[in-house]
Amino acid sequence: MATTETVHLTLDDVFSLSLDALVGCGANSDNAKPVAESIRDAEADGIRNVGLNYLPHYCEHLLCGKVNGQVKAAFKQTAPGVVICDARNGFAHSAFVLTFEKFASVALNNGIGSLCLQNSYAAGVIGWYVEKIAEQGLVGLAFANSPVAIAPWGGTRAFFGTNPMAFAFPRPDDFPVLIDQSSSTTAKVNVVQAANKGEPIPDTWALDKYGNPTTDPKAGLEGSMSPAGGYKGVAMAMIVDLLAGALGGPSMSYNASLFAGNSGGPPNVGQFFIAIDPSVFNSDFAQRAEAMISAMLAQENVRLPGNRRLLNRALFAEQGVTLEYDLYQKLKAYSQAQSVSN
C-alpha cells in the first residue's frame, strides 16, 4: 500500500542516492557520476520530472541494456571546428563530460566549435550542458533529438520527438542566462506521470489519436504531444532532429526506440552542441548583453529566462528537497538491484 510519508534530503543526499542507484544497476563510477550530478542539479532547479522521478528510467534501462553503463565514449576531431564523439550506447552526460575539454578548446582556438554526440541516450536536462559551456565564457547552444512524440503539422501520428533545444550566454558578474525549451508545450514525462497518477492534464498538453486536444493523459499518450506554438513547434522539432539525429544518428526521432519501457534496445539518438567565443566577434558583447538585460528588466513584472531555477537553487541548497517515501525506498533498492538479480 502506498504511503503519504515523505523523506527529507539534502542535495548531497540526492547525489549519493542517485550514484548508488546507478552503480547498483550496473554503471561504473565514471558514467554514473555525471548522471548523478545532473539529477542533483535538476532537483536543485526544481525540475523533479527529470530529477529523481526520472532516475528509475535510467536504472531500469541499465538493467535491461537500453543504455550501457560500462562503456567509455570515444571522440575525434574531424575538422578545425568539429569534434565527434561516439557515446557507444552509453550516457550522454558522461560522453559530454569526457569530451568537454577538447570541445571547449576547439571553440576557443577557432572562435566557434561544434560537438556531435552519436549513438547516444536520453540527455535529461539539456540546459545542464549549455550552462557548462557558458561557464567557460562561451555562448552555448544544444539540440537533442528523442523518440516520437509530436505529429507533423496536419498529421495525427507521432513522428518527431519533443526534441529540446537550449541556449546559454555568460555574464561577467552573474550566472549565465539560460533558455531551455522543448518543441512540445510540455515534456512528455509530465503526461506519463499524470497517467500514472490518474490525474487529468491541461487540454494544451496533448492530442488524442484523432488529433483533438484532450485532458485524458492516456488518450494523449496514444496520440501525440501538442507542439509549442502550433506549426512552429513542429518546425523546431524538425530542425533539432536534423541537427542531432541526422548528424548524430543513426536514429532520427521516427525510428528511435522509445525511452519509455524496457523493450526496443538502445535508442541511438544524438545531441549536437555549438560553442561560440563572443570575444572574437565583438569585444563589447558583454556590455551589449547587459544593456539589453537592463532595458528589458526596466519593465514591470519581467524576469530573465531561467531566473526561477536560480531562486530554487538558493532555496533547495539551504532547505533540501522532500521526496515521497515510496519513491525513496524504490531508489534505495536499486543500489542492490544487480546483486539481487545475480
Image: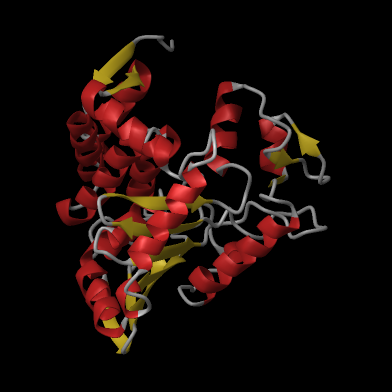
Q: Is residue 154 above or below residue 1?
A: below
The percent position of residue 44, horizontal first and vertical second, equals: 31, 34
Q: Residue furthest bottom?
A: 79
The percent position of residue 280, horizontal first and vertical second, equals: 32, 80
Nearer-the-camera pick, 264 or 237: 237
Quadrant of residue 84 within the rendered picture: bottom left
Q: Is residue 77 above or below residue 273?
A: below
What residue is drawn where x is 26% and y is 18%? 8
Q: Is residue 48 above or below residue 250?
A: above
Quadrant of residue 67 within the rendered picture: bottom left
Residue 277 shows up from this direction: no
Q: Is residue 160 left or right of residue 302?
A: right
The percent position of residue 225, horizontal first and vertical second, equals: 67, 46
Quadrant that contains the C terminus: top left
Q: Is residue 140 above or below residue 307?
A: below
Nearer-the-camera pick, 309 or 73: 309
Q: Is residue 176 left or right of residue 142?
A: left
What residue is drawn where x is 77% and y is 40%? 208
Q: Is residue 312 left or right of residue 317?
A: right
The percent position of residue 239, horizontal first and vertical second, equals: 60, 69
Residue 251 shows up from this direction: yes
Q: Is residue 173 left or right of residue 121?
A: left
What residue is drawn where x is 35% and y is 40%? 42
